[in-house]
């Protein structure tokens, strides 16, 4: 009995020791495998632009002067008459084209503008009322036309062509009204037409002596005059680089008075953006290169522009002149603007800085969660941003296109839709995660 007791004690002790060993192993495993609360993100191939933000000054062909040095590009009212432009901004005009009409008083000018609005409304209502054979209208096709008209309207808003919005709205209304009539809606605009016609007759436009104003030059008309038309010699930009001091002076300059100006004739569509860029960010901006330029505050993006000139370094900055040959209403009024110069576009994976790690061999990479296993994958950083990087799988190629096996790490390669670990504790390659948050 005593022997049995000793055997039992031995068994109990062995079980206790074994339990302690198992418990210690579990505790140790939990300690070393604990990764805290894991945070992960799925990555995919994307593109990102490297941009340089600048303050720029726009110069156009709008500083034509006479022998006395006075501006002849800016158009001024004469003989105390009031001028009303008859063409929209950025419209091309030839020498002698009518660009405005003048009136003896502001009251007459306002009446003339009111008459144009009424004539437009009358014409619009008549075009709807005079529609025939609406029962044969293809409603399916009309739905497509309505969608196109709405799309065109939204594009005008996006491109800041605000002067054309009224016509676009009328086109949308016209298409929708056509569908209503075609599907049986009864509409009668007789009372509204008579009211508009009565208002138009009361204005007595025929008694006004409207004098047509002819364009003195060929070019394109812009009604906005800001007083910086003569700030810089446009013709000099085609052959001479500007200096950083000149850019500073333009940005700090004050506008000249333009009292009595009703518009200007700009000689050509070509215009320039003058700005300063840090030397270390302008290394890829070379004369003759093309970049894209955006004006986010004006809703203008990715304009193709050619590098016209780059100055010598001055206090860490260079003066750069960009040339553009596009023109529309929104571009015609740019002057002192905040711009973003896209110096390079990167295609790769967007990875948070918090996910970047370095392994024992000094390779930069990320930990990827593959099932429950942590896998280290090396990366090649393409571009550093404030809180993330653009990166690619660490694959290096020889000049003949073959993979350089000596440079390329013999490790798993980063792929689209990998689950990258952004936050975790005690991570290492090959570790098994018991609990995934």
Image (tube, rainbow, N blue to C red):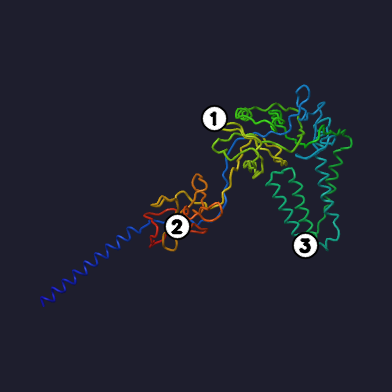
Which one is nearer the viewer's eye here, 235 or 436?
235
Which quadrant of the rendered structure holds the N terminus? bottom left
Closer mark to the observer between disc 2 and disc 1: 2
The residue that mark 2 highlights is: 410
Residue occupying the point 82% across, 41% down: 116
Q: Secondary structure at mark 3?
A: helix
Looking at the image, the residue that sits furthest to the right is 206
Instruction: Answer above or below: position of 357 versus 136.
Output: above
Residue occupying the point 44% across, 59% down: 369
The residue that mark 1 highlights is: 315
Residue 43 horizontal side relative to residue 210, left or right: left
The residue that mark 3 highlights is: 139
- Which mark sits nearer the N-terminus, 1 or 3? 3
Residue 412 position, x and y percent, is 46, 59
Looking at the image, the residue that sits furthest to the front is 400
Residue occupying the point 67% across, 47% down: 158
């Amino acid at each position: 009995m005593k022997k049995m007791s000793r055997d039992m004690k031995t068994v109990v002790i062995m079980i206790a020791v074994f339990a302690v060993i198992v418990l210690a192993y579990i505790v140790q495993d939990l300690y070393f495998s604990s990764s805290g609360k894991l945070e992960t993100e799925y990555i995919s191939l994307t593109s990102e632009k490297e941009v340089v933000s600048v303050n720029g000054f726009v110069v156009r062909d709008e500083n034509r002067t006479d022998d006395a040095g006075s501006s002849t590009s800016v158009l001024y009212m004469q003989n105390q008459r009031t001028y009303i432009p008859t063409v929209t901004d950025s419209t091309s005009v030839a020498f002698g084209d009518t660009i405005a009409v003048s009136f003896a008083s502001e009251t007459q000018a306002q009446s003339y503008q009111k008459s144009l609005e009424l004539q437009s409304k009358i014409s619009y209502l008549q075009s709807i009322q005079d529609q025939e054979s609406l029962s044969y209208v293809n409603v399916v096709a009309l739905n497509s036309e309505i969608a196109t008209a709405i799309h065109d309207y939204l594009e005008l808003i996006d491109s800041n062509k605000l002067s054309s919005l009224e016509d676009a709205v009328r086109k949308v209304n016209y298409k929708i009204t056509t569908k209503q009539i075609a599907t049986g809606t009864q509409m009668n605009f007789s009372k509204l037409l008579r009211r508009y016609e009565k208002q138009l007759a009361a204005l007595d436009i025929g008694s006004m002596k409207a004098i047509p104003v002819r364009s003195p030059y060929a070019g394109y008309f812009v009604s906005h005059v800001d007083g910086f038309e003569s700030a810089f010699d446009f013709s000099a930009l085609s052959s001479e680089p500007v200096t950083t001091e000149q850019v500073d002076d333009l940005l700090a300059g004050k506008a000249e008075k333009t009292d009595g100006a009703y518009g200007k004739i700009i000689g050509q569509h070509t215009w320039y953006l003058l700005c300063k860029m840090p030397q270390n960010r302008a290394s890829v901006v070379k004369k003759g290169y093309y970049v894209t330029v955006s004006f986010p505050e004006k809703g203008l993006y990715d304009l193709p522009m050619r590098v016209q000139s780059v100055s010598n370094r001055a206090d860490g900055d260079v003066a750069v002149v960009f040339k553009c040959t596009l023109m529309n209403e929104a571009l015609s009024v740019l002057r002192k603007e905040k711009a973003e110069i896209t110096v390079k576009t990167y295609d790769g994976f967007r990875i948070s800085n918090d996910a970047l790690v370095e392994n024992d061999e000094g390779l930069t990479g990320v930990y990827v969660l593959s099932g429950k296993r942590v896998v280290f994958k090396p990366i090649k950083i393409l571009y550093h941003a404030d809180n993330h990087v653009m990166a690619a799988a660490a694959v290096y190629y020889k000049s003949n296109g073959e993979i350089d096996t000596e440079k390329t790490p013999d490790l798993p390669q980063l792929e689209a839709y990998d689950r990258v670990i952004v936050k975790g504790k005690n991570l290492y390659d090959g570790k098994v995660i018991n609990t995934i948050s």
